[in-house]
Image: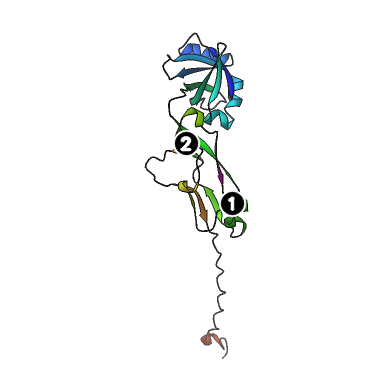
Amino acid sequence: MKFVAFERAKQGTGASRRLRNSGRTPGIVYGSTSAPQLIELDHNALWHALKKEAFHASILEMEFNGQTSQVLLRDYQMHPYKQLVQHIDFQRVDANTTLHMKVPMHFSGEEESEAVKTDKCTVTHVVTELEVACLPASLPEFIAVDLKGLTMGKSLHLNDITLPAGCKAITHGKKNPVLVSVVAPVEEVVAAPVAAAPADAKGKGKGKK
């Protein structure tokens, strides 16, 4: 994805407030061997870009002062209750430096699996994004996972999928985490009808003299 950034001359709370009032969002670009660069972006264009998954999980092409460079979205701050992006941070991409990025997982095929189609199991996506380490050229926009092979009683683990070439999963100590769980349907138990209690023998003839 591409976006356009403009040079920001002033910084500080007051300057940032005036910038937001004019329809711009203040930001910064840091990393690599260059000094941090203050930037500003058109707020409306940024607002729509943030709604796209690729803006969060892929290498972006930033046009700045007539030149294009590669950056990653690293952070942004939203107003507590307004639809307003208050600040945004980007990191420069170095082609020879390994990145650590969270990549979204795209699941497909579960409706065609035996677990769902035949056994009516409930499938839960336990992990929706996976942190990977890779060089910028190997960073995928998403990780595709085919769930057609799901069966009842067997969950899908990290070791069951193939990662994109050049990517290594970062699991923070978990050797083989569950990505997708498969839960068998709960059978309803119908309670047997309760037999009517026999008439009270002592009650017979009550009222007779």
Instruction: Indicate the secondary structure of the residue bearing disc 2.
Output: loop
Instruction: Characterize the magenta stretch by its predominant secondary structure.
Output: loop
Instruction: Indicate the secondary structure of the residue bearing disc 1.
Output: loop
- Where does the magenta region start and end? 139-152
Residue 64 versus residue 106 in the image, above or below: above
Asked if the stretch drawn in magenta spans residue 184, the answer is no
Residue 188 versus residue 208 in the image, above or below: above
- The residue closer to the viewer here, 185 or 146, is 146
Residue 191 versus residue 92 in the image, above or below: below
Left or right relative to 90: residue 205: right
Badge 1: residue crowd in 10 Å (few <14, some 14–19, many ≥20)? some
- Type of amino acid under label 2: Cys
Residue 144 versus residue 3 in the image, above or below: below
User: Is any atom of residue 136 visible in this view?
Assistant: yes
Where residue 108 sits: x, y (%)? 60, 45
- The residue closer to the viewer here, 39 or 163, is 163
**Numbered mark located on residue 139 in the image:** none
Residue furthest out toward the bottom? 209
Where residue 102 sits: x, y (%)? 48, 34
Query: Label 2: which residue?
Result: 167
Where residue 63 sits: x, y (%)? 56, 16
Residue that appears at 49% across and 28% down: 136
Query: Label 1: which residue?
Result: 148
Upstream in sequence: badge 2 or badge 1: 1
- Type of amino acid under label 1: Lys
- The residue closer to the viewer here, 14 or 105, is 105
User: Is any atom of residue 42 visible in this view?
Assistant: no
